[in-house]
Amino acid sequence: MTGHVRISLAAWVATVLGALVLTPVFSGPFLFISAFLCGAVTGTGILLQNWRAPRFVVPVVQLAVLVELISFFFLRDTLKFGLFPWKETVLEFNDQMVNAMDSINRFSAPLPPDSHLTLFAASVIAAAGLLIHLVAVQLKQAAWAGLLLLTMYTVPAATVHGGLPALLFIPPAVGYIVLLSAEGRTRLSRWGRRISGVSHLDASEPIEASALGQAGRRIGLTVVALATLLPALLPALPEGVVGNGLAGGGAGGGIGASITTADPMLDMGKNLKRGDNVTALTYTGKPTYLRLTSLDLFDGRTWRLSPRQEGQKITNSPLSPPPGFAGDLGKLGQTKMKIEVTRNFRSQFAPVPYPLRTISLKNRWRFDTSSLDVVSANGQVVGGQKYELSYYELAPTAQQLNDAVNGTAPDQFTSSVPSRTPKSIRNLASRVTQGSNGNHFQEAAMLQEWFRTSGGFTYSTAASSESGMRALEAFLTDNKTGYCEQFATGMALMARILGIPARVGIGFLPGQPAKDNQNVVKMHDMHAWPELYFQGYGWIRFEPTPSARVATPPTWTNAVPPGTNTPSISPSTGPVSPGQSEDPGISKPVNPRELPEDNGIGVIDTGNWWTNGGGKAIGLGVGAIALLCIPWLIRSLTRRRRFARPPGRIGVEGLWAEVRDTSRDLGLDWSEIATPRQLGTWLTTKLPAENHAQALKLARGVESIRYAGQADAEVDLRTEAAAVRKALWSQAKLSRRWRARILPPSWRWYLNRGSAEASDLLDEFDLLLARIRSAILPRRAH
């Protein structure tokens, strides 16, 4: 068996054993599929190497084979002619990955054996197998492949509740030992391995130098080092680097927060439980709720966005009328507002009041006609945006809602009740609304009153963030403790059971007043509320969350005795300046977060461009540039040190190494097995005629020092080395010279040298153990 075949098979074994750590996370046949895919990748690599294909071709063909197999197994319906991946294949693969990430965020381990989750697991493992093969076989750096195996172990270890069983660390470790042993055996079969210091020991001494023992000690040292470094490193990583976990979030850290289109409800729960309460935005205008989006699809597990049509472009004209409103828009009051979102808040949705009339965000922003959400069309976040808007003051009276006729549902989603809805919740909805005589407004008002007052509920953000049907049933019938998510989703589901179309709005409470007629909205002001549909008026906000969060509900949601005179919907009698009055449907919370640091918020300085992310962006940019400059810096300092050495053996060897590294940097094929005389002759083929004598003199000098034992302190070849290096540099192409400056290929040699020196250090440790053993244990009689 050839060396590359041995290492390839060992890489496949290491990948499969490393994938075993994912069995507590995923279920179904993902492991067998992954083993087959990795086997196909490995077999392709072995076949191409036996055919002596160019090194860069091997991973390209392996990737093509992997893409074809994944497409054939999981995305066969999208293949062109049933065989070739096409545009539809890429789009479907992206959708499946998005669905998988959504499921990973929503469910606890083990995840259900859904096809998109199996595709996700198999793709990740197969990609890891391809990278392990590339590193171990193509780059011949088997030791570095252990980082990929470690990644497969640390990710589930950091996300599965209670951690992974300790025994699951054994398969990746065994796989790593197999890979190292195969690599070591291949090297021994070619050149043998020098063990530092072996000449100092008597050959008859019982020295332990087995490959398995050495590999075990190296793995142990690596694990100890990583166990020491990772705990210190992980807390410093930004939010989202490791992941959100498999069972929802806990208290968060970091300096920002985000709302994604995949699961806005989950993101809101995480932001409410964050330890820091940074500013999300400031606005000038009447205090009001600011909505991000509305969730209208409930499948019995989560509330999320239903499939939507492509958003409409935003122009200077008013947006679409409020969905379901049948009155005269000209009789509705209109209010203007200016909003400035800090860079702390990363969301593809723009926070706006409902119903929105106009907004200055254009270009790559769109609005949805069914919800009047404003969303980015290209993934851009709203953080750092400043915009102006106007919105309608849609505030019907309780009497008008009471008199609204029961109409048909506005769509197919907002009246849907999952078939798995427990009978206990259905009966509870009927029992709470007894005496409503089928009037939808009376039913909605009774539900709101039950949640806020008579139902015995308690507001607490310490409650579980699970939103499945079982968790919702437990909240409604048993523990009755939760935060806005549970109250909003509970009322929306019970409203649907009663025949009232309902959805859940996600956004912000009005915030706190600050200087210059501004209002400051913080991350802990995130909120969820139910929106119920009434014929002729459209979507109306209710507030079931108790007074611990919101003191009083909107005035239009309070039931009134028949015959009570209430104002009608009419335009404002006069202009309203920002901050002059408050929306009648809003009141400040008594204790919005039950956190000591949130009480008594006064005038708040929202900072400037530097504090709101500019300084961090500049720091990251400078750090990235500094990181890219490391190879150039090391190369420059090494060259300077070599030319600064005095004449003699060490100086000549350093100059020869500099010519070697320059040749490598410029893409020349410097031979490691050629003699100095052969290399001198080879150099003359790469240099102008006027530099041939200098190249030959330099090569002869190295040869005499190495083989003739000459160590004349007067031998100074710096002039020749500088001339040869300059000539090599002048003969290279401009693009090659720039690459040699920015990322010199010879820099990789220093990494290999560091690895070799670390290996020699471990060899010394092995020999020290052997000496101790030979000194303690009595020698066996011959």
Image: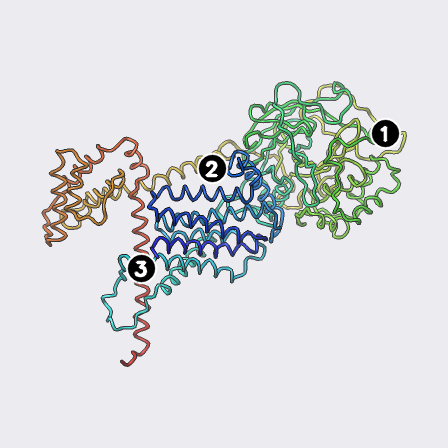
Q: Quadrant of residue 342?
A: top right
Toward the viewer: 577 or 648? Answer: 648
Q: Which residue appears farthest toward the front when viewing the image?
A: 81
Toward the viewer: 111 or 744? Answer: 111
The residue wearing badge 3 is: 761
Helix, strand or loop for disc 3: helix
Residue 231 appears at what percent x and percent y?
48, 53
Tag in front: 1 or 2 = 1
Residue 546 appears at what percent x and percent y?
74, 43
Q: Earlier in the sequence, mark 3 or mark 2?
A: 2
Q: Is residue 492 above or below residue 5?
A: above
The residue wearing badge 2 is: 616
Q: How is the image coloured?
A: rainbow
Q: Earlier in the sequence, mark 1 or mark 3?
A: 1
Instruction: Assess whether mark 3 and mark 1 are in contact (beta carbons under 8 angstroms).
Output: no
Identify which amino acid the numbered label 1 is placed on.
Asp
Does 244 sit left or right of 194 as displayed?
right
The residue wearing badge 1 is: 403
Helix, strand or loop for disc 2: helix
Tag in front: 3 or 2 = 3
